[in-house]
Image (cartoon, rainbow, N blue to C red):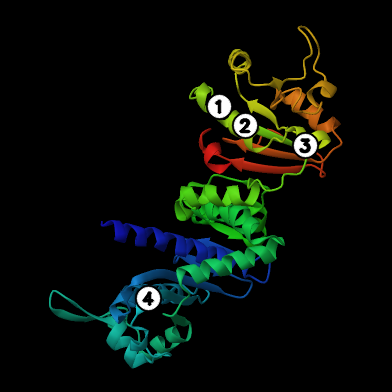
Amino acid sequence: MTDRSAVDTIRGYFYQFDYSILKVLQMSNHGDSIAVECIEDVDIHTATEVTAVQCKYYSGTEYNHSVIKPAVMYMLTHFKAIRDDGRPVVRYSLCGHYSSGQQKLTLPIDVAFLKQYFLTYSEKKVERRHHDELNLSDADLAEFLSVLDIDIKAASFEDQFAQVIKELQTAYGCTPFSAEYFYYNNALALMRELTIQPLPANRTITKREFLERSDTSSVLFNEWFVRKNGEKAHFSALRKQYFTVLNLSPFERFFLIEVDPETLVRSDLKDVLHILSRKWSKTTKRDGNSSFCPYVYVHRLPNDELVALKKELATEGFGFIDGYDFHGADFNVKSISKPATHDNGIKLKVLNSIDNLEATVGSITRTREVYQFHLGKSYFDPANQAVKHIQIQLKKLTDIKAII
């Protein structure tokens, strides 16, 4: 497979995922549902009918009848099978985006056109008629056409995605950024999870459950989402949204960083701390009473590694405090929260534990912002609606440098 065809294949997957997300969001009733990879790519279940949809993205392909012929034949086979079994009628939908050639198909089609272009084929130089093999009459085929919808002018990849974001904004009452980086991110992961379930019942979800499971207050590292946007663009968008430093207000900012003790490189962590201090501090003489510096808590950092880290920072003349005024002292919120100024040389406030973090966030009355970077599950909740809390999942520690 060439690089170009590989890209097209990936975009085709995303196109189907986005179509499924769009359809569930557009359902009028929260009890309506969709099923993925069952009869077709997505089956839409309402209180009154079932519609089996095959949705394809052919941005580099010209439309020809042969492209959709196998799908039409499969749908006709299914139509006959459920009718013979006495099961309820299913509607069928073929939805596709093509680069050109849409003028070759005039809708609606009649029985003669259906038989000639979609049901007749050659096998070993012998002409075959699929409708004859199924023993279907013209009346049967007319009935099939009454439940078949064909759309070869489906939205482009970009237009469909834009519609998904608008629907998510409406569903959650959020900004375009939140719609994409919170809710779409989760919705995409949810759709991917559904497609790999072995049992059809587990590939079905109602609109109500979909909205609940896609809801989050955290930017999660969904590999499919990042693959779609590109890692560089993903990090750039997060930086633009949360970490663009312009006219910083003198807030109390807490940066929570989770590390993996097995893969931690101390120099990488020190780089992150230096960047945070440099970008999120104002301690010049002219700042006066408006001076400030960030708080940092490193989650899962072994105690001996924390001690070694602080020793190195102290040796290098990097000014920090940790809320302990002398050997054997208890943690003191007043000590850790004292202003960082040009005169006292404080560049960073290091919190040693979750308990220290909770006590400090809970005691300070100035405007607080918490930025939590986590590798897996969230590990801190400020439990106070007045505290701004941004949660971002990462794959590795060094991703922070690309974001902030």
- Residue mark closest to the camera, 2 vs 4: 2
Residue depicted at x 54% and y 29%: 271
- The amino acid at mark 2 is Ile
- Residue mark closest to the camera, 3 vs 4: 3
Quick one: label 3 or label 4, which is nearer the N terminus? 4
Q: Quadrant of residue 335?
A: top right
Confirm or deny contact between disc 2 and disc 3 (CB under 8 A): no
Quick one: label 2 or label 3, which is nearer the N terminus? 2
Residue labelled with disc 4: 98
State left or right for residue 335 relative to residue 348. right
Residue depicted at x 76% and y 7%: 327
Which structural element holds mark 4? strand
Can residue 176 be spotted in the picture?
yes
Q: Residue furthest front?
A: 286
Looking at the rendered image, the quarter that the C terminus falls into is top right
State left or right for residue 383 relative to residue 161. right
Confirm or deny contact between disc 2 and disc 1 (CB under 8 A): yes
Identify the mark at residue 257; answer none if there is no mark: 2
Identify the mark at residue 269; answer none if there is no mark: 1
